[in-house]
Image: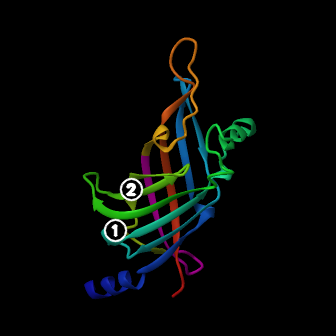
Amino acid sequence: MFLSVLLAASAFAGTWSLDPAHSKVGFRVSHMMVSSVEGEFPDVSAKLDLEPGKVADLSVQVEVEMKTVDTNEPKRDAHLRSAEFLDVEKFPTMRFVSKKVKPNKDGGFDVFGELTLHGVTKAVTLEAKGLQQAVTDPWGNKRVGVHATATIDRQEFGVAFSQTLDGGGVLVGDEIELRIDAEFTLDPS
């Protein structure tokens, strides 16, 4: 029994591609210090090298098309795409490349890597759960899923737009919570 489980797991080792129809890369940021705005980037691609259950050995590369930012408010989205915020004409993509993975105390794992946003590259840690087990969908595709979060300071990446409110505080917070829910399919070998 153990040998058959071991052989099945290693049969799922390989390169996995993001399934964008079943994935979401989103964010949340404070708005006027009284609420938050959420958004997502619908155009994302990613490759994951993984043997399910052996997350310490994984590597991942993610690329996000910044012009696809969507907060469900067209005027705000246009402002986010402008040079005051993301400057998507000059910096069309955001990239994350993993460097190291370690188990964490919550039963998940931390993915240490480099995030490039707005022309600036900084170390970022994703707190993640998942990727422990592959499943086979009704069409014969092997699938794994992951949920990951990170918090970044947009000012550190040069996204510096700020406006002070009359009563104190700021229009847009500096801390951005990134949230990733991703499903990957095993590439044919």
Q: Position of residue 189 (x, y in %)?
A: 51, 88
* Residue type at tag 1: Val
Q: Nearer the viewer, residue 47 or 12?
A: 47
Q: Position of residue 183 (x, y in %)?
A: 52, 65
Q: Quadrant of the N terminus?
A: bottom left
In the image, is residue 39 above or below residue 101? above
Which residue is farthest right?
Answer: 74
Q: Which residue is mark 2?
A: 128
Span shown in magenta:
136-150
Q: Which residue is mark 1?
A: 55
CB-based contact (under 8 Å), mark 2 and mark 1: yes
Q: Earlier in the sequence, mark 2 or mark 1?
A: 1
**Main SS, magenta residues:** strand
Residue 139 is a magenta residue:
yes
* Residue type at tag 2: Ala
Horizontal arrangement in the rendering, residue 109 relative to residue 81 (left or right): left
- Residue in the picture at 42% in, 48% down: 150
Q: Position of residue 140 (x, y in %)?
A: 56, 81
